[in-house]
Image: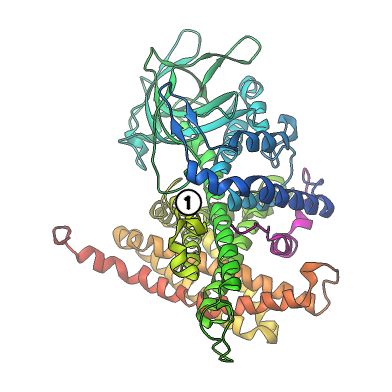
Amino acid sequence: MVDYNAPLRDMQFILDELAGLDEIAALPGCEEASPELVAAVLEEAGRFAAGVLAPINYPGDVEGCRLDGDGRVHVPAGWQQAYARFAEAGWIGLSLPQEWGGQGLPRILSTAVWEMWFSTNMAFTMLPQLNVSQAEALLIAATEAQKETWLRKVVSGEWGSTMNLTEPQAGSDLAATRCRAEPQADGSYRLFGQKIFISYGEHELTANIVHLVLARLPDAPAGVKGLSLFIVPKYLLDADGEPAAKNDVRCISIEHKLGIHGSPTCTMSYGDGGGAVGYLLGAPNRGLETMFIMMNEARFGVGVQGVGLGERAYQFALAHARERVQGRDALSGASGRPILCHPDVKRMLLSMRARLMAMRALLYTAAGWFDRARHHPDPEVAGRCRRYVDLLMPVAKGWCTEVGNEICDDAIQVFGGMGFVEETGIAQFFRDARIITIYEGTTGIQGNDLVGRKILRENGETLRELLAELRATLDVLRADGSLGEIADGFADNIDALEGAADWILANGRDQPADVLAGAVPFLMLLGTVCGGWQLARAALAARGRLAGAGGGQGETHDPVYLRSLIELTRFYFATIGPQAAAHAVTVRDAGGALARFPENAF
């Protein structure tokens, strides 16, 4: 297996030059994020990822999980010890409020740290990620008493977390939810029903598991407006707030999956013995709003999974290309050279690195928008950042996961036939990555959300705002004569995006089916352009440092590294950027052909 090397140089460059770490550290509530602390946290996270999580990743994939006759789920060997160390180190609460046991550091830092966890062991990391998402939901929707009871234990990781939406008949259509909640005289509820695809729905890694469950009250209106959200613990609490009697909740099966074998995906049954005790979280019939707080946290995290898995697959492929000797050097004709010298192998690797850098830069920049939206004292700045986050959340989830899958696929191609052999380890990343385009909303759902809710609903206002910012970056590129090819490619990308957006806005009301037929291509178009935008900004920053404008020392100021970023950006616009025009054509033209094709002709 290939040792994991955290891409700290790239991370630090993006944090400093693109995401605006110094500016965020000056915001109220973010003052502790000094350069020294950030560097120390990244270094320690890299060591933990490489030394604790990576070594148990492949064995955990081979061993998987099992359900015994008593309803207990057994996770792979090493999971318990790793989780205890993870929770004890305080990693779960890195960006959560200090008053509830977190460290209160900005999202911009925790995003880089979680990328390392996902790179080295995604199946394991899904458990603490659920705690972070649930903590955000509790912070917004829970009463003070509920926070005192549940939140601190979730932040510390002493108790695990889940979210329970899906039912056998209610996948993406949550209006079909049947799980019901019956009110009790003491103010609690009894829940009855089944939930499927529940990550870490049962295990013994933590002393308790806090389930958040969508269910219907007896008098609830039909559809998604009749869903309420309930806190349903695995163990009920005693007078001291400690786990005591087992609640009427049980795991009745676990899924046998293509990937993420170390993560138990459970079918959960509520109320087989008289009703699972639950407590209403938030207002009645407003549960979906609260659950979407958790869902948005999870969706952003899944986008980071795309980068993390892609990065690890890239590291495996690069190591193999440096070691594998095959064929002759295309330039010199010499034999005995590694396959990295072959132009097509180099093309695949450089394409992987360019896409990784684009995704990472976009996600870290978005994390900076999260922080500004939450902490910036100027409401205009905070509002603009919040709008950007809302607009690009489907891109963060959809585009980054699709591209992450492509990178894992390319990594197998670099390995050749050995990539198809499990013992090399590269196949695990391909298998693990396949789920990330599906859970927390498929790419199709993300595309519909982007076009329907984020663009048509507001008549494209935020997208126009973003386009103006893209053109402002283009103007700076134009002013630097040495980056002309990058400026030309970026200009073409912006034109393609603007033309496709104009078509959607012109036809969204009268031809909704045609527009939605191009929703995913439009999502991929927007991701391609925004990824290129971030690389263009990286090239500008690298150019500034080379010219001496930034000063400073260290790896991120190495001239060879800085020049490589500029060439990486040129490569992106020469090979990946042109896809934007093709996506734009698909947005405009696919719907008509789709509509004309009769369903009975399939």
Q: Nearer the viewer, residue 462 or 533?
A: 533
How many residues crowd mark 1 within 10 Å: few (<14), some (14–19), many (20+)? many
Residue 379 visible, this orientation:
no
Residue furthest out toward the left:
600
- Residue 45 at what x, y percent from top left? 71, 49
Residue 583: give x, y in percent of width and height: 41, 71
The answer to whether residue 244 is above or below residue 599 is: above
Magenta segment includes 8 = yes
The residue that appears at 33% across and 37% down in the rendered structure is 170
Q: Nearer the viewer, residue 594 or 471?
A: 594
Q: For this rendering, which residue is in front, 78 or 153?
A: 78
User: Where does residue 296 sit, x and y in percent of width and height?
Assistant: 53, 44
Image quadrant in which you'd find residue 561: bottom right
Q: Return the residue at label 1.
A: 432
Q: Residue furthest front?
A: 336
Q: 463 or 416, which lies in front?
A: 416
Residue sitting at x 58%, y 41%: 129
Amino acid carrying label 1: it is: Asp
Asked if the magenta segment contains residue 548, the reply would be no
Name the image quarter holding the N terminus: bottom right
| Visible residue check, residue 213 | yes
Asked if residue 171 lies left or right of residue 246, the reply is left
Magenta stretch in the rendered image: 1-29
Q: How is the image coloured?
A: rainbow
Dividing the picture into quarters, in which one does residue 523 lie?
A: bottom left
Question: Left of 109 or right of it: where is 283?
Answer: left
| Disc 1 secondary structure class | helix
